[in-house]
Image: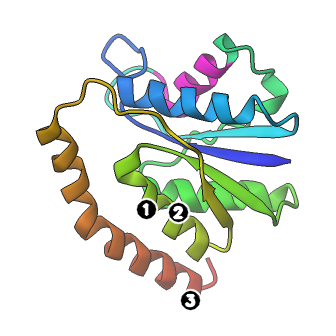
Amino acid sequence: MTPIIIFGAAVRPDGSPSPALRRRVEAAHRFGARRPDALYLPTGARGRHGDAESRVMARLLGEFGVAPGAILEEPTATDTLSSVRACRDLLRARGHRGRVYAATSRYHLARCLLLLRLAGLAARPVPIGASGDVSLARRWYWRLREIPAIPYDAALLLWHRARGR
């Protein structure tokens, strides 16, 4: 089994995937299409609009031809840390202890990999393409948001680990 965790992003008011969500799923699909044992784990709860992010991603994977049995939805996570913890628990319940792959936006990748590794998963990145038509100012906004988020989430995860959760 080659688990590919796809981290959620916004769903548009009409229920369609945002460009960021679409890019993450497309990257995961390109990567997983070369692996016959790929298991896609789209993670993300329902936000302000439409279905849960995981559901929207699972539908998109289905449109790309991924078999339902190769998709394991995680529809409860409301942020990156809860996605990591929930996916870790799903994989452990299936007996998986090996490598996992993270599909997310470039600005978000360092945090996802760090948290997955702190959670005990041997994480590697899924190659992702260009960030589309996102402005330079917007890309910097998202990168700067990660500065406080990385140590904050890492500390929370270590605290949860120390408490056996």
Task: Where is residue 82? Give x, y as percent.
Answer: 50, 58
Task: Where is residue 110? Give x, y as percent.
Answer: 43, 62
Q: Residue at x 63, y 58 (%)?
A: 124
- The part of the image, by quadrant, that contains residue 118 is bottom right
Q: Residue at x 65, y 11 (%)?
A: 63
Regarding mark 2 in the picture, which secondary structure is present there? helix
Question: Mark 1 highlights which residue?
Answer: 110
Which residues are drawn in magenta?
Answer: 51-61
Question: Mark 3 highlights which residue?
Answer: 162
Q: Residue at x 70, y 61 (%)?
A: 89
> Is residue 58 magenta-colored?
yes
Indicate whether 26 appears above or below 75.
above
Question: Mark 2 highlights which residue?
Answer: 113
Q: Are marks 1 and 2 in contact (CB under 8 Å)?
A: yes
- The part of the image, by quadrant, that contains residue 10 is top left
Indicate whether 52 appears above or below 62.
below
Q: Which sits earlier in the primary sequence, circle 1 or circle 3?
A: 1
Residue positioned most to the left = 137
Amino acid on which disc 3 is placed = Ala
Closest to the observer, 6 or 47: 6
Regarding mark 3 in the picture, which secondary structure is present there? helix
Amino acid on which disc 2 is placed = Leu
Q: Nearer the viewer, mark 3 or mark 2?
A: 2
Q: Are marks 3 and 2 in contact (CB under 8 Å)?
A: no
In the image: residue 148, left or right of residue 128? left
- What secondary structure is the magenta-colored segment mainly? helix
Indicate whether 120 appears above or below 131.
below
